[in-house]
Amino acid sequence: MRGSLKNALGEPFERAKKHAEICLLETTPIWHYLLLQEDDGKPVRSIVANQFAEYKRQIKDFSDRQLIYFIGMRPRIRLYDQIRYARFSKKIIIPLEIGPQRQRVKAKVLFAAQDDNGAIKRVNISNDATMITQEWDENLIKEPLHYFLDKCGIDLGHSSRVAYVGRTDNPNIRAIDGNHRGLSDTLGLSKETDEDVFIHYNVFHLRYHAEATNTGINFQVSNSLIDHIDAKSEAGLIELMFIDYFEPDTMKWSMPDYRISLRKKLLELNETYNVSAVTASYDLEHVSSLYRLAGNRFGTRDNHIFRYNIENDYITSELLEDLDF
């Protein structure tokens, strides 16, 4: 329960210098193109919304989690011909058309199924420009192109350039329903650049590290348990930090205002709760093209780890290669 340890840790914790850490728990990328399609006569937008309604319930039940989403643009990829098996091989040839120049490349990868007897055999594959259908025995799978390439381990070196950062308690509605200024602005930009748009839904958790110098006690505690920052402010802090970090294209005109708000929140943490640093970590164990992000400030990186140091009303920021605690 949120705030269940409020005031329970006593003076040693309250007086200790604290380091706040925001870490990524999970991420789900949604290709916006799919939201406009149908699957067996059902709108995909409704299917995803129903799935995210369960997602919403889980996040609500775990009061220590915040959902922050990134809307990004990445190179357009389509299939220009049928996927086929290479002769005398269990490798498939995937004919890809990439970017506004429609550059054509062919990727080759082992692709086979195992039957009940352990024998490896070919899979029946058919496709259109964006969807791949796979059949073997009584199995039938349909996969969108970007996700199929990720499953096959094909990394074209692409990334989603973050164009908008937002927060929501209703991932089954925002930004899936399409009534969203940031999404509309990003879709407008993507038409000019001929790129695919993805919405990355991210679940973050905020916790504190502290050492009471007079007792030698080390503390690691979730913010939700002590509720130093209420849930709404917690989400707002994470949102502002990633806005500052990515400098999204659709938000650049308001960056001075966002940075003033972020500075105010960081100074309040320092003055009220003796927080001397806040680190944000978008750190994945396995990074592939589908999950790779880029921003205007620091470019493309496999993982995004950065810190704000707060001392004597002065705030500095630094880019980290790894967590150092």
Image (tube, grey):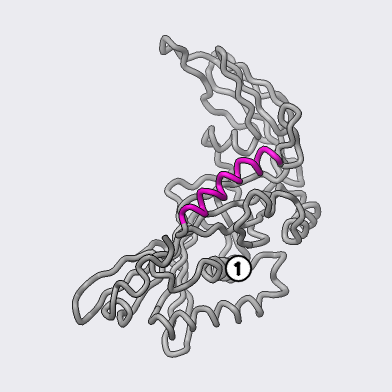
Q: In the displayed structure, does residue 258 sit left or right of residue 88?
A: right
Judge whether residue 129 is colored magenta: no
The quadrant in which residue 31 appears is top right
Q: How many marks?
A: 1
Q: Quadrant of residue 105?
A: top right
Q: Position of residue 265 (x, y in %)?
A: 53, 79
- Residue 54 highlighted magenta (yes or no): yes
Say which element carries label 1.
helix
Can the viewer see residue 295? yes
Q: From the viewer's perspective, is residue 145 above or below residue 170? A: above
**In this orientation, does residue 245 appear?**
no
Q: Residue at x 55, y 15 (%)?
A: 122
Residue shown at 72%/65% (left/top)?
A: 250
Residue 245 appears at what percent x and percent y?
56, 68
Is 158 situated above or below 64? above
The one of 53 and 22 positioned closer to us in this rendering: 53
Q: Which residue is mark 1?
A: 243
Q: Position of residue 165 (x, y in %)?
A: 63, 62
Magenta stretch bounds: 46-62
Residue at left offset 55%, top offset 82%: 264
- The answer to which of 216 and 302 lies nearer the viewer is 216
Q: Which residue does the image show at 34% across and 65% down from the upper left?
A: 221
Residue 47 position within the rendered picture, expressed as x and y whole percent measured from the top left: 67, 37
What is the residue that sits farthest to the left in this orientation?
215
Please, what is the dominant secondary structure of the magenta stretch?
helix
Q: Residue furthest top?
A: 117
Examine the rendered structure and indicate whether residue 224 appears above or below residue 269. Answer: above
**Residue neighbourhood size for the residue with mark 1, other residues' Cα within 10 Å, grouped as few (<14), some (14–19), many (≥20):** many
Q: Quadrant of the N terminus?
A: bottom left
Query: Quadrant of the image for the C terminus?
Result: bottom left
Q: Which amino acid, mark 1?
A: Ile
